[in-house]
Amino acid sequence: MTLRRSGGDMQLNDPRLFRQLAYVDGQWTAGRSNHDEPVLDPANGEILGYCALLDAEQITGAVTAAERAFAGWRALSVDERGRLLQRWYQLLHEHREDLAHLMTLEQGKPLRDARGEVDYGASFIQWFAEEARRAYGMTIPSHIPNAMLGTLKEPVGVSVMLTPWNFPLAMITRKAGAALAAGCPVIVKPANETPFTALALAELAERAGIPPGIFNVVTGEPATVSEVLCTDTRVRSVSFTGSTRVGKLLIRQSAGTVKRMSLELGGNAPFIVCEDVDVDEAAREAVAAKFQTAGQDCLAANRIFVHRRIYDRFLERFAVHMKALRVGSGMMEVDIGPLIHRRAVEAAQAIVDDAVNRGARLVAGNQSMAPGANFFMPTLLADITPEMRVFREETFSPVAGVCAFDDDEAVVAAANDTEYGLAAYIYSNDVKRIWKMMRGLEYGMVSVNTLKMTGAPIPFGGVKQSGLGREGGAQGLEEYLDTKYFCLGNMPGPSGS
């Protein structure tokens, strides 16, 4: 018999937030024959609890429940849906500490960062609860005699969210907040590494009064879940955050039923530092941009381009600020927690080894100081080149690669030399230079002289192989709405004839 932990073991203020069963049609659901797998604390490898593995028939049942609930949910006024979402938003804030605690235990990020994610994630629920009122149609001046033309916005239908382990709360609320506000029932599949935050969201959604079948959380083998959901004709929309490789697989699986796809995929963010900035400040900002979420962040600075005039000084200051970062369990006062599992540590080391073997300088990064098996100490590689994996791949680890540039056009070309196009950073005080670089960078989002660029009002997303569609802002709601055109013929003219 599997020994299961309780929320009390985790020292939650509300132990009922710790759930180890899937949530389907308002019911807590175990896998058939109690099939499950352990969920580990990445900081120490201890078993936190178990993730239920639903079979294909149970996952199909979630689609059936969502489809059945769709008519009633879409029939509610936007005010009624908005009130339920606002109540869900309030409950997230009321249980902020427990949600952050759960997130840190299963994901590893510092508790301070987890609290910030709860606030960030909740903001999307509030935003879309209000934004749904602005899902306007339009009146079209008619070219047809005695006809009235226009458009309506209608919910697309059952929507699936496949979410990652690096942001186990915010990636759900950013998607589900929009879909629910638009009138769509949702099925969330969280990463098996981090199911408990998603299940706590389901518990709070139920308390908020969101009806059965409207917010479902299924857990299971990823290949089984994606195959069932992406091929079911009743699922009309699929949203995914994760690797470009998996995103391409989901596109292929969904092609047979021509689903609406919203994909936030890989990133390889350039961080361009021009010679007209304060070097110490730019180095400090680059460290923050690189090592957020232990580098396990699609927005993390991946390739740092520094003007040659300030290159050596920048490397010196970057190393100083990097070495000041505290590494350890997220439950402690640290800046960097563990990587999600041992395989991530091995992948990080392989990228460092490849770079050093190809001529990069290992400026700093002593792995003998790592406090545990899943930890990787912040590492600085200088003089990286396009032939190295650290330049080409999304490292998803606390490994920083830096190189020098001499010419603005050349650095923009180098920054664009990737299949990815999610986010880019520019640090300069020259407005004309900034504008030219910003326009030249082939990225969906460009941040200038600041790291703070995300939030509920902005359209988050990339170009090229970094994804399709946008999340957040007015555009995020559009991902879950269809435009219906209407033509009303034989309408009376202005005179009433």
Image (cartoon, grey):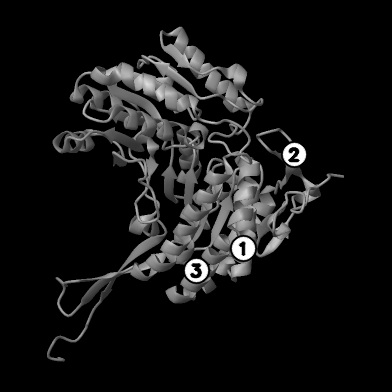
The amino acid on which the numbered mark 3 sits, given as a three-letter code, is Gln
Classed neighbour count for the residue bearing mark 1: other residues with Cα under 10 Å, few (<14), some (14–19), many (≥20): many
- Helix, strand or loop under label 3: helix
* Residue that badge 1 annotates: 204
Q: On the image, numbered disc 2 is attached to which residue?
A: 47
Q: Earlier in the sequence, mark 2 or mark 1?
A: 2
Q: Is 477 on the left-hand or right-hand side of 112?
A: left
> Is 362 rendered above or below residue 238?
above
Q: Is residue 430 above or below residue 71?
A: above
Cα separation between marks 1 and 3? 12 Å
Task: Say left or right for 240 vs 45.
Answer: left
Real-space CA distance between mark 2 and mark 1, rounded to the nearest whole angstrom: 24 Å
Image quadrant containing the N terminus? top right
Is disc 2 surrounded by few (<14), some (14 to 19) or many (20+) residues within 10 Å?
Answer: some
Residue 154: give x, y in percent of width and height: 39, 67
- Give the x, y percent position of residue 492: 19, 87
Please report whichever mark, 2 or 3, sits nearer to the chain's N-terminal start. Answer: 2
Callout 2: SS: strand
Residue picked out by circle 3: 86
For this rendering, which residue is in front, 167 or 361? 361
In the foreground, 191 or 97: 97
